[in-house]
Image (cartoon, rainbow, N blue to C red):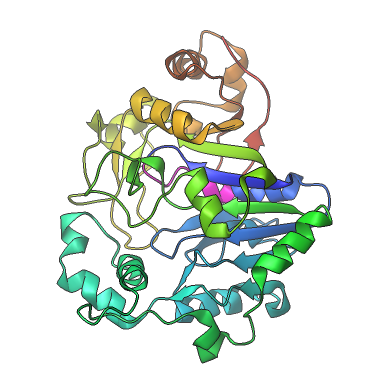
Amino acid sequence: MPVSIVVGGQFGSEGKGKVALEIARKAKGPVTVIRVGGPNSGHTGYDRSGKKWALRQMPASCIDKNVDVVFPAGSYIDVELLLSEIEELQYPKKRVFISPYARIILPEHKNWERQAGLTGAIGSTGSGVGGAVMAAVAREASNFPLSSPDAEHFAPLQGFVTDVATLLRMQLDKGFRVVIEGTQGFGLSLLEGGYWPKATSRCTTAAGALAEAGLSPLDVDDVTMVIRSYPIRVAGESGPLLGETTWEEIASNIGGEDIREYTTVTQKLRRVGKFDPDIVNRAVSVNSPTRIVMNHLDYLGHVSDLDDSNTEIARFISRINSAIGRSIDWFGFSPFGVLCAKEYSK
């Protein structure tokens, strides 16, 4: 059962990319990484030379260029963006595999989102994923204006199209570690998140990611849920954020440095709030993670502070563990994907 799923437990931007990369790096033996969903959110990771990669279509877990990359039937692909990221990464094309059933994002999908006012009404990135999902679900209905081509019949992708269901089953039978890199966060999930219509167009849970990957629940042995010390939402009318605060207030705890965060896709300043155990508890209930990772602890202090129960981080972690009824397993202090994989509980 060598399948790992990485999902977000809040509103996205929890650091799923660097965690998926860390899992791929820690794996023993060959690895395949799967990117479900589409390019409406960015994933960031740092390669071994320290170079930052902010990717929207290719998975962040591939930046070491030593894994197979699979886009399953549950993928929505902006072809121009995908090809540009492959070129920028200089990724071996023979290691990129796309399901014939993956859907293509067209300019008309992006135009439909803009004309529908979704970018302002719900804080959508306008990347066309919602339009592409609508077109696929419409199934060429005569009264719906958008088409939904698949990868098999889209000429620019012909060299990548593969029977990925058979490929993945063969790899799993050989003991490959398969890492499914989920997108966005639980609070944005179309079904379970609880914030509809301020939501994304897909289900963002572990079960949803697994379904999009086309694999069996019996394949899974690792579900990693990633959260952050201060959750964020994107700019604009993107929905409720409990305990919303400012980046300046958070920074005042660590010397006032500039820690403002901007969205990868639209480069807008993110909204930020205080930790809300309710959404994390609901995410834990739905995803039943085997591991919980908390990132952005550098907004509270240093990794060495974990060993001193009198520090702000130690007290914070203690409160979180109590509030969610679980112990945080991995701690993220750095954007470079270096996680403190040690047990800590009070």
- Observer-nearest residue: 5 or 319? 5
Quarter where residue 331 is shown: top right
Q: Establish if 203 lies above or below 294.
A: below
Instruction: Tell me: 146 left or right of 186.
Output: left
Residue 91 in percent (x, y) is at 67, 74
Residue sitting at x 35%, y 53%:
262
- Labels in figure, total: 0
Q: Establish if 274 lies above or below 85.
A: above
Q: Establish if 150 lies above or below 289.
A: below
- Observer-nearest residue: 77 or 149? 149
Q: Quadrant of the C terminus?
A: top right
Residue 239 in percent (x, y) is at 21, 44
Is 80 contained in the magenta span? no
Q: Which region is colored magenta?
A: 11-18
- Observer-nearest residue: 327 or 144? 144
Residue sitting at x 57%, y 54%:
45
Residue 122 in percent (x, y) is at 21, 54
Residue sitting at x 47%, y 29%:
284
Instruction: Tell me: 199 left or right of 220.
Output: left
Quarter where residue 240 is shown: top left
